[in-house]
Image (cartoon, grey):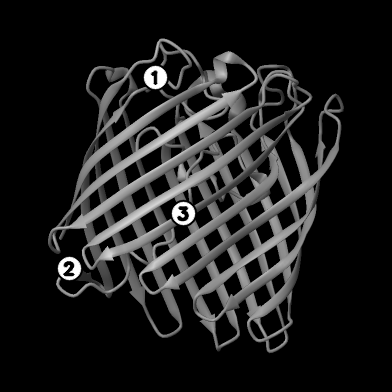
Amino acid sequence: MPGAGPVLALSILCLGATPLMGQDEQRDMSIMSLPRPGYEPRTLTAGGFLLVPSLEADATYNDNIFATPDRRKGDTVFDIQPRLTGELKRSTFDLKTDLHADLIRYADTPRENVNTFGAKADATKTFGASQTLNATVTFDRTYERRSDPEADFDRSLPPALINLATGDFSYAYKGGRAGVIARVAISHLDYLPTVDADRDLTTYRASVRGLLNVTQRVAVYIEPFVNRRDARLRVDRNGINRDTTTSGALAGLSFDITNRLQGNIGAGVFSSDPDDRRLKSFTGLAASGRLVWHPRVRTTVVADVFRGDVATIRNGAIGRIDTRAGVSIDQEARHNLILHAGVAIDNIHYRGSIDHDQRYISGTAEARYLMNRFLTLILNTTYTHRGADQQVDRFHRWQTQLGIRFAY
């Protein structure tokens, strides 16, 4: 949906996330991927790849397109989203690809029009039953949403376009009693407007998770991590060097209790050490968790929680800590009717600033009706409320979407 925060940022290096972090929930796709005889999209085959082309077109009425507390402006937003996914499967190798674009047009406010596109490749190689290598590379041309915590309030300027490139590489070993997951990742955030050059940021992260099986389906883990943020410019628009090294550790449980309950939950501490000596180092509580529960085959409940250090260029802020939690449910009401609902809260705390904190509450409901294997009707409504210490940061809005998805 055009007004939602970008999905891309929620998992960018976890505790080393960027200012782009939106309020999107992480959808579990197990319900959507269930077999539906007679409704499966047709596929194409090319060079061993199984290809699935699709096209989604929708219209969304947004009653507050600039996310402002007053002088609210509503508009109808038209969206066209072509996509081509592919998969190459071998006995010990799996490659998934995704090419997509999003053409966004406003009926009465054409300066808000944007074109986005992206590509993703996800390769997994297994060695026997115990070792796995994974590499994921993505590129996205996206844009800054008006509702992002540190978005520019100048209505006369079009949305800032952003290039985001990420690479994520991991190795996993699963033994009879113990296991390890090692991960390194990098992301490069590039705002195209020259005025936003101080937001350009490269983030590096490394972590190692050691697991010890308590039972066949429950393991305890400890995960030390280190994160480095390097801004493109020496100082930001406020004269501050925002380069920061964050390190810490999480400890928790990883579980796969029957086939109905899986997830992990961990808590720990992080220490943020800015390069600029005017920004004091600080230590805080870190948390990360995700629970996926299948009370029935056709029902999925997902709960997520996160707390950690996040990049900021806010004037007067010496650091930023985000805390968020959300829960969603997907239900196959009929073989061709899929329902979704979710709620989320998000607290943005700016350290050193007594009047910049923001608090998001959002809720969404959606229905997807599969008319046949080619056409799907989509109806979605989303409500977002942002409370804030400053009046200018407050807003609330409804977005109602009606769309259709074409599959080959």
Q: CA distance from mark 2 to mark 3?
A: 25 Å
Q: Which residue is mark 2?
A: 39
Residue 289: x %, y % from top left: 63, 58
| Horizontal arrangement in the rendering, residue 79 relative to residue 195 (left or right) | left
Say above or below: 67 vs 321.
Answer: above
Q: Secondary structure at mark 2?
A: loop
Residue 257: x %, y % from top left: 58, 78
* Three-letter amino acid code of the residue under disc 3: Ser
Q: CA distance from mark 2 to mark 1?
A: 41 Å
Residue at (27, 56) in percent of width and height: 84
Say above or below: 182 vs 109.
Answer: below
* Three-letter amino acid code of the residue under disc 1: Pro
Residue at (52, 65) in percent of width and height: 292
Front residue of this view, candidates 367 and 276 = 367
Q: CA distance from mark 1 to mark 3?
A: 33 Å
Q: Which residue is mark 3?
A: 328
* Three-letter amino acid code of the residue under disc 2: Tyr
Residue at (77, 45) in percent of width and height: 246
Q: Secondary structure at mark 3?
A: strand
Q: Nearer the viewer, mark 2 or mark 1?
A: 2
Q: Nearer the viewer, mark 1 or mark 3?
A: 3
Say above or below: 102 vs 134.
Answer: above
Crowding at mark 2 (Cα within 10 Å: few <14, some 14-19, many 20+): some
Residue 1: x %, y % from top left: 34, 39
Q: Earlier in the sequence, mark 2 or mark 1?
A: 2
| Horizontal arrangement in the rendering, residue 122 relative to residue 184 (left or right) | left
Residue 42: x %, y % from top left: 17, 68
